[in-house]
Amino acid sequence: MSRYDHLDESVVRTRPSRRGSRPRTKERPAHEDAVVGMVVGVDRGRYTTRVGERTVVAMRARELGRTRIVVGDRVAMVGDTSGQPDTLARIVRIEERETVLRRSADDSDTVERIIVANADQLVVVTALANPEPRPRMVDRCLVAAYDAGLDPLLVLTKADLADPGPFLEHYRSLDVPHVITRAAGPASDGRESLDPASVEEVRAHLVDRVSVLVGHSGVGKSTLVNALVPEAGRATGSVNEVTGRGRHTSTSAVALPLPEGGWVVDTPGVRSFGLGHVDPATFVEHFDDLAPGTAGCPRGCSHDEPDCALDEWVAQGHAGPSGPGRLESLRRLLRSRSGDERG
């Protein structure tokens, strides 16, 4: 090369491209041949799915970014979807969710945490004793169910220890379906067993549905799941005699198929059910016996103030004999959501 070549603009040295000359595109493949399955378990970046009768383990595709995949999601997968041992598919798309059950860490936290997708029934499991029932927790779960568009079902356990009548009276005006279960003594393997008749009654409500079970630790939720799906083998625990609370036995949500059809989603025991993601103004909409009474409320009424029309509505008997209790339940939720813990 001449020593003057560096002055010639026609002489250009280019560095070879490591990425080639093919232009990049933001268009993603449609994956029209993807196989759709239901996520039944999540563990450290691996997603266990069911495609028909086979189990397929998959990982998330990079193109999904940080989109969270939860139990109950219907996902499209490519790659090896045979379900054979040591095979791994790739999730490339999350199908549109029909319902989403969510909660927040507490009422001041507006960040929602999705519990399960595409369920159609929320089964609230609560013990009548040991530990003592907490109506406020049940109320919160009902609001979350209605907000998500799920049908609620109350399952009251340990009826051999306490009368369910007083507790059920609190929810009579909402006409929430319920099932009462009681212990039948230890089974042959040493674990607590349930009265078979009550288990079958619960089962009748679950067939051909996707039902998510929620409840405090120690209320007998895992015992119920083991009775419904004997091969599930969910760990069970006892209640602390000092605190009156159960210890966590389920560590992650898992969907289990019912022999008769349908799915049961067992979730870890919770000690709180935050409603920070739910607009307080919509709370009253979930109380069908009270909602019509808000027509006479002043503009911007919080439904927990002296001029609230709900007091007169209840006093006139429009909400039925359970009206006063239902109104207090509504106001407990409103106070809790606003940080006011009166009552």
Image (cartoon, helix red, strand yellow):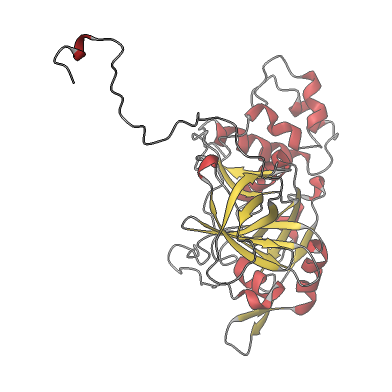
On the image, the x and y values in percent for residue 31 come to 66, 45
On the image, the x and y values in percent for residue 110 come to 52, 33
The furthest residue to the bottom: 188
Q: Quadrant of residue 143?
A: top right
Quadrant containing the N terminus is top left
In-front residue for pair 104/341: 104
The furthest residue to the left: 3
Image point (55%, 61%), residue name: 88
Left or right of 215 in this view: 22: left
Image point (65%, 74%), residue name: 226
- Whether residue 182 is visible to the viewer of this picture, yes or no, is no
- Vertical position of residue 235 compared to residue 169: above or below: below
On the image, the x and y values in percent for residue 59 come to 53, 54
Quadrant containing the C terminus is top right
In-front residue for pair 58/275: 58
Left or right of 323 in this view: 273: left
The furthest residue to the front: 2
Image point (55%, 30%), residue name: 26
- Vertical position of residue 148 compared to residue 48: above or below: above
On the image, the x and y values in percent for residue 259 come to 77, 72
In-front residue for pair 156/132: 156
Q: Quadrant of residue 319?
A: top right
- Whether residue 250 is visible to the viewer of this picture, yes or no, is yes
Left or right of 108 in this view: 332: right
Q: How many numbered discs?
A: 0
